Image (cartoon, helix red, strand yellow):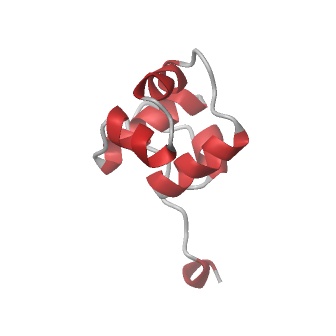
Amino acid sequence: MGIGANIQATRQAVGLTQEQLAEAVGVSRQTVTKWESGETSPDLEHAAALADVLGCTVDALANFDSKGTGLGAPPRESISSAA
């Protein structure tokens, strides 16, 4: 899966609409639609904001492959659980 599919799957997994995600990140709904469709990709600043809102890492958004499970990117580990 590419970043667009991961944004969409993770957004759906956490129960946000495109409009809600767009508002939280500070972009238009149309921008989120373009990211999810693969027409464009978020810049680093927006990728970081997406990861924060969606509760995952930028790396997970960019690289996670659910192998057709329909699951979003895995949640980021807290610092205390990673230690």
Taking depth in this image into account, of 74 and 18 the one nearest to the observer is 18
Question: Which of the 4 image quarters holds residue 65?
Answer: top right
- Tell me which residue sits at (49%, 18%) in the image: 37
User: Does the rendering let one see residue 66?
Assistant: yes
Q: Is residue 9 left or right of residue 43?
A: left
Q: Position of residue 56 (x, y in %)?
A: 53, 56
Quadrant (top left/top right/bottom left/bottom right) for the C terminus: bottom right
- Tell me which residue sits at (33%, 50%) in the image: 14
- Tell me which residue sits at (50%, 25%) in the image: 31
Q: How many marks?
A: 0
Quadrant (top left/top right/bottom left/bottom right) for the N terminus: top right
Residue 67 lies, with reference to residue 57, above or below; the image says above
User: Does the rendering let one see residue 1?
Assistant: no
Q: Position of residue 62 (x, y in %)?
A: 64, 39
- Tell me which residue sits at (68%, 45%) in the image: 45
Outermost residue on the right side: it is: 44
Q: Is residue 47 left or right of residue 31?
A: right
Question: Which of the 4 image quarters holds residue 2?
Answer: top right
Q: Position of residue 19 (x, y in %)?
A: 34, 35
Taking depth in this image into account, of 14 and 27 the one nearest to the observer is 27
Residue 18 lies, with reference to residue 23, above or below; the image says above
Q: Position of residue 9 (x, y in %)?
A: 40, 36
Taking depth in this image into account, of 71 and 9 the one nearest to the observer is 9
Taking depth in this image into account, of 66 and 4 the one nearest to the observer is 4
